[in-house]
Every structure is written in C-alpha cells, then in structure tokens.
Amino acid sequence: MAKKKANKAANRPVKPTSNAKGPAQKQIHKERGTLLTVLLALIFLHSVVATYLGYITLKDEYARTTWVLPLMTLVSVAGIVAAMGMWYWKQWGITLYAITCVIQAAVHLMLTGSLLVVFYDLLPVSILAYVINLQSKKNLFE
C-alpha cells in the first residue's frame, strides 16, 4: 500500500516554484518591436495633448468652472500611468487606457461638443488594438 502511494507521488507532475532553477522555468522573451514602441510613446504624448486640446476648445459656459481643468488633468495622469503599465507589459495598463480614453471622449464631447475631439480621443485605442493583434502580443501582457 505504501509502495503504491510512493509510485503515485512519483508520477505526479511537479509544479515549478519560484526558487526552481533549470528547465522547469521557462522565461518568455518579450520584445515590443518598433511599431509598438513608437505607439506607446505616442500614447504617452496623447494623454498630455488631449488635455490641452480639450481645454482650448471648451464651450464658454465651461471655461470659467473650477472642476474642468482638474478633471482633465486627472484623466491625463491616468493615461500616462496606463502608458507606463503597458510599457512594463501589464494587462491593467491596456484596460486603464481603454477606460481612460472612453471617459476622456465623453468629457470632451460634453465640454466641447466637437466630434473631432472625440475622434482624436478614440483613435489611439483602435490603433493600439490593431497593433497588438497584428504583432500577436496579446499573450505577453500579464
């Protein structure tokens, strides 16, 4: 009986631990590629420029309110944090960036009334999705 239990234990696959060395650990080499690197840099810049673009195209009734600029700055900072998360291959970076762009588009549509600004807000999300699918990088974001 004890011999059967020992054989069963020997036949079980061993889960690799963080301390294991050798062939049990498989390191995934993550390479961004030029297109994704340039896109992440543009996403970083987009967060800042979108705030400026939204602010200069404000409707007159919102230009004097005190909550507009802090809200737009907060959304801009969230976009920068999302770009940094994507740079370090974090899944939450993509999710945060998509949420940030949707919020930014809604706020800009309300404040400016311009669909051109909304298009500017949503275009990078669609380009990012295309590049990630094109380069088959979906599985690299953890």
Image (cartoon, rainbow, N blue to C red):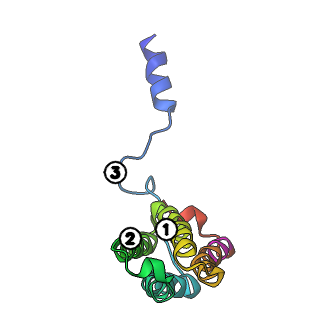
Q: Nearer the viewer, residue 68 or 118?
A: 68
Magenta span dominant secondary structure:
helix
How crowded pointer 1 is (Cα within 10 Å; few <14, some 14-19, many 20+) is rated as many
Looking at the rendered structure, the kind of residue marked 1 is Thr
Nearest to the observer: residue 132 or residue 16: 132
Considering only vertical position in the picture, is 105 above or below 51? above
Q: Looking at the image, is mark 2 or mark 3 earlier in the sequence?
A: 3
Q: Residue at x 56, y 67 (%)?
A: 102
Q: Position of residue 62 (x, y in %)?
A: 45, 77
Q: Residue at x 51, y 62 (%)?
A: 95
Where are the magenta residues, as a range?
129-133
The nearer-to-camera label among 2 and 1 is: 2
Q: Is residue 131 magenta?
A: yes
In depth, the one of 88 and 73 nearer the eye is 73
Residue on which the image places disc 3: 18
Type of amino acid under label 2? Leu
